[in-house]
Amino acid sequence: MKGNWAPADTGATTLRVVVWRGDENGRFEEFEVPRQPSQTVLDVVTYIQRSLDPTLSYRFACRVGMCGSCAMTVNGTPRWTCRTHVDKVASGARLEIAPLANMPVVKDLVADMGEFFDKWARARGHFKPSATRNDAFATVDPASSERREADAGIECIGCGVCYAACDVVAWNRDYLGPAALNRAWTLVNDARDAGQAGRLAAVAGDAGCHSCHTLMSCTEHCPTKLSPTRSIAGLKRATWRLALVPEDGE
Ligand code: SF4
Ligand code: SF4
Ligand code: FES
């Protein structure tokens, strides 16, 4: 983002900010940033890049809590930085900002989300149509339990906050993680989808839903207030049913 952005001179006190620099083998570097009213953590990072060190790498797009691309670790907790006010998280006028956990670091505050999205593919997180363009539109009852289950998880924007908060991902990097499993459950409840048997088989393995410890860290941290834990519980039930009553393959 280019422009004439500059901090207002409010005479505010300063904030001590330590920011991760470099790749996995990097280190924290300290900056002094003026306090501002209603200042967000993303404002702080932007100030550092614009006014103190233009080589700082970070990611953002919308600045209004819609895209999820500004997610970082702030004082040890994964958050959307554009929706996090400094006043709420700065402890003793100090902030520690790092890239999202459980992902490789590209540089500074930018995490590599390739592995995160690969797991959506492994969990069969894509829609597989059961109809052709010649068929009539599918009618889905908005009050049906399947539609309500799908609605509960569909607003995921793939920000990775839940994934960074998940202890099981930290212990087992093969684990599909809360976002991919939430996506799978959304599609399991889509009456129009024809990929159910393959999807349930994909999420039933060692790296799938049964590895979840149900500690709800993902649900506590999701900025969109989704509950991947609830979706994973649904997948556990569905895969148990599948084990009891085997279905034909896709
Ligand atoms: S479930 Fe929530 S925290 Fe996880 S990727 Fe989706 S929006 Fe982000
Ligand atoms: S509830 Fe499951 S998916 Fe969510 S953070 Fe805990 S172990 Fe990870
Ligand atoms: S920049 Fe889009 S959610 Fe923060």
Image (cartoon, helix red, strand yellow):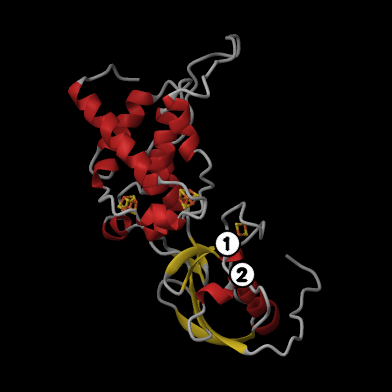
Query: In this rendering, would 170 be left or right of 90?
Result: left
Residue depicted at x 47% and y 27%? 147
Q: Is residue 52 above or below residue 230?
A: below
Q: Is mark 2 within 8 Å of ligand 3?
A: yes
At which x and y percent is residue 158? Answer: 51, 48
At which x and y percent is residue 11? Answer: 72, 90
Q: Nearer the viewer, residue 71 or 142?
A: 142
At which x and y percent is residue 188? Answer: 40, 29
Q: Specify the amino acid type for callout 1.
A: Cys
Q: Residues within 10 Å of mark 1 (few under 14, many from 20)?
A: many
Mark 2 and mark 1 in contact (Cβ < 8 Å)? yes
Query: In this rendering, would 242 be left or right of 116?
Result: left
Residue depicted at x 38% and y 48%? 178
Mark 1, secondary structure of its residue: loop
Q: Which mark is residue 60?
A: none
Q: Specify the amino acid type for callout 2.
A: Leu
Q: Which residue is mark 1?
A: 70
Q: Nearer the viewer, residue 225 or 166?
A: 225
Q: Is mark 1 within 8 Å of ligand 3?
A: yes
**Quadrant assignment for the C terminus:** top left
Query: In this rendering, would 48 be left or right of 10?
Result: left
Q: Which mark is residue 42?
A: 2
Q: Is residue 18 above or below residue 23?
A: below
Calculate the distance from the C-alpha at mark 1 to the C-alpha at mark 2: 7 Å
Residue depicted at x 76% and y 81%? 8
Q: Nearer the viewer, residue 108 or 43?
A: 43
Can residue 43 be seen in the rendering of this structure?
A: yes
Residue depicted at x 34% and y 27%? 198
Choose top left, top right, bottom left or bottom right for residue 244: top left
